[in-house]
């Protein structure tokens, strides 16, 4: 007989037509053993906290690895938000890096990578909502990867997607943001990330050129880094339904929300301006997340919150995934109160009584509405447009010991294109 449990499933649907700590994040970074042993804490709410624990710019230079840099980027846009940092060993010296595969491959089950990550998430009990992963090559190792993604990232994307699905089934929903080191080549030849159908994963492929120029002398491998800490921090700093690429801050839309970036470039040292509009459009359509700008508008912004999922599906955007994950957490915490509870059924059919059906519908509707639709905090906007709960009253609880509840959530929209038509008229 199955152990009593509450099951929440997330369905990926077609979009072709028609007081939780949401920002709590985990930054996983491969680093030298000396750096790992020198850090004496793993949870921070400010850059100063991390520096006190041994994560400093000087430590980056000494160990020739970027840890402080990614943590600094996170707190530049998400100061006060809880960030956990898990340092794992570098994977190859010399040779191709395999950090992503070691972290997310449950078959290989590396104790220092996959096992360490699984254990950390279990220890945090579902508090972690976002995971970012950055890679440091061992000192003296040359990055030999070519093209738009490395071999490790190419296979790691699917593994990370499966890993996130497994975490969801363990009631610890997470989204994963991966660093795409040394992006190079043309947009036409770039790997189509959307084709990987890995909607739980975002890939970040660019950074600030000025930071790269400042970092490559003390940390030579920084020539290939991407700003995964910045993307993670941006997501952590906004509501779950908001796009990390937004240009202004709601609700008034009068304050710019640009990134702390001076000059944007891809992680293979290709300037943003070296790609024409058609090429940047193609990279966007293939699911790449990079830093972009808009003619006549100052500042830099993430191009969108793309994931590696099919563009017509409900997991094609980080914001859509975060909405679904938050609803799942609310649903679980709400209905755990009813697990193994005694309920009355119709004495002649064994089916749910109408009063029980309405009670279940009312409880979960109220919980999701209060958290995501009618939050009393005026600084927080609605995170969904509506929620509808349906329960088939014909379910025979006596025979199945199970109640199936369907949720239909209409998300908020994202304005990707604004088209205006301008004409010059002669009033005479």
Image (spheres, helix red, strand yellow):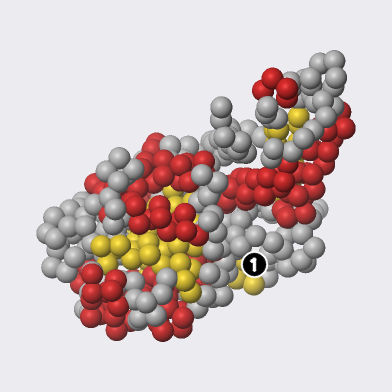
Residue nearest the viewer, comparing 146 with 390: 390
Task: Answer yes or no: is residue 74 visible.
Answer: no
**Image spot of residue 316 (x, y percent):** 51, 43
Q: Locate residue 342 relative to residue 12 in the image: left or right.
A: right
**Image spot of residue 107 (x, y percent):** 30, 40
Using the image, determine if residue 390 lies above or below residue 84. above
- The residue pinned by badge 1 equals 249
User: Which image quadrant is residue 56 in?
Assistant: bottom left
Please tell me which residue is depicted at 86% across the width and 28% down the height of the picture: 354
Please tell me which residue is depicted at 33% across the width and 66% down the height of the picture: 87
**Image spot of residue 353 (x, y percent):** 85, 27
Task: Answer yes or no: is residue 175 visible.
Answer: yes
**Image spot of residue 5 (x, y percent):** 60, 38
User: Which image quadrant is residue 209 in?
Assistant: bottom left
Please tell me which residue is depicted at 56% across the width and 30% down the height of the picture: 2
User: How many labels sit on residues?
Assistant: 1
Residue nearest the viewer, comparing 202 with 327: 327
Please tell me which residue is depicted at 23% across the width and 74% down the height of the picture: 34
Pick out the residue farthest to the top.
348
Which quarter of the figure is the N terminus placed in? top right
Q: Locate residue 75 relative to residue 273 in the image: left or right.
A: right
User: Which image quadrant is residue 132 in?
Assistant: bottom left
Using the image, determine if residue 403 lies above or below residue 141. above
Helix, strand or loop at disc 1? strand
Residue neighbourhood size for the residue with mark 1, other residues' Cα within 10 Å, grouped as few (<14), some (14–19), many (≥20): some
Pick out the residue farthest to the front.
1
Q: Locate residue 399 relative to residue 49 in the image: left or right.
A: right
């Amino acid at each position: 007989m199955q152990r009593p449990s509450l099951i929440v499933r997330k369905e990926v649907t077609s979009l072709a037509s028609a007081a939780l700590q949401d920002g709590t994040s985990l930054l996983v970074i491969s680093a030298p053993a000396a750096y790992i042993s020198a850090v004496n804490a793993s949870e921070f709410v400010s850059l100063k906290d991390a520096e006190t624990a041994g994560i400093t710019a000087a430590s980056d230079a000494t160990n020739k690895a970027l840890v402080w840099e990614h943590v600094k980027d996170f707190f530049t846009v998400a100061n006060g938000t809880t960030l956990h940092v898990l340092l794992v060993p570098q994977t190859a010296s010399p040779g191709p890096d395999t950090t992503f595969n070691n972290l997310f491959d449950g078959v290989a089950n590396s104790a220092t990578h996959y096992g360490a990550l699984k254990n950390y998430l279990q220890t945090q009990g579902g508090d972690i909502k976002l995971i970012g992963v950055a890679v440091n090559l061992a000192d003296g190792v040359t990055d030999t990867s070519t093209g738009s993604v490395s071999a490790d990232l190419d296979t790691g994307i699917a593994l990370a997607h499966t890993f996130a699905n497994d975490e969801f089934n363990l009631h610890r929903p997470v989204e994963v943001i991966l660093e795409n080191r040394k992006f190079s080549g043309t947009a036409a030849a770039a790997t189509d990330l959307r084709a990987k159908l890995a909607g739980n994963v975002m890939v970040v492929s660019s950074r600030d050129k000025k930071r790269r120029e400042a970092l490559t002398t003390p940390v030579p491998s920084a020539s290939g880094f991407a700003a995964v800490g910045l993307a993670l921090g941006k997501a952590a700093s906004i509501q779950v339904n908001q796009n990390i690429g937004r240009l202004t801050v709601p609700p008034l839309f009068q304050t710019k929300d640009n990134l702390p970036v001076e000059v944007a470039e891809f992680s293979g040292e290709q300037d943003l301006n070296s790609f024409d509009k058609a090429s940047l459009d193609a990279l966007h359509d293939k699911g790449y997340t990079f830093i972009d700008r808009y003619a006549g508008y100052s500042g830099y912004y993430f191009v969108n919150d793309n994931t590696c999922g099919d563009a017509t599906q409900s997991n094609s955007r980080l914001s859509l995934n975060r909405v679904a994950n938050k609803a799942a957490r609310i649903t679980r915490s709400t209905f755990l109160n009813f697990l193994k509870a005694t309920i009355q059924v119709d004495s002649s059919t064994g089916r749910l009584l109408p009063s029980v059906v309405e009670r279940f519908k009312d409880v979960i509707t109220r919980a999701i509405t209060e958290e995501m639709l009618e939050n009393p905090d005026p600084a927080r906007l609605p995170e969904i447009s509506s929620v509808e709960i349906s329960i088939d009253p014909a379910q025979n609880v006596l025979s199945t010991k199970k109640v199936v509840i369907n949720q239909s959530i209409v998300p908020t929209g994202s304005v990707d294109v604004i088209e205006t038509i301008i004409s010059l008229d002669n009033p005479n």
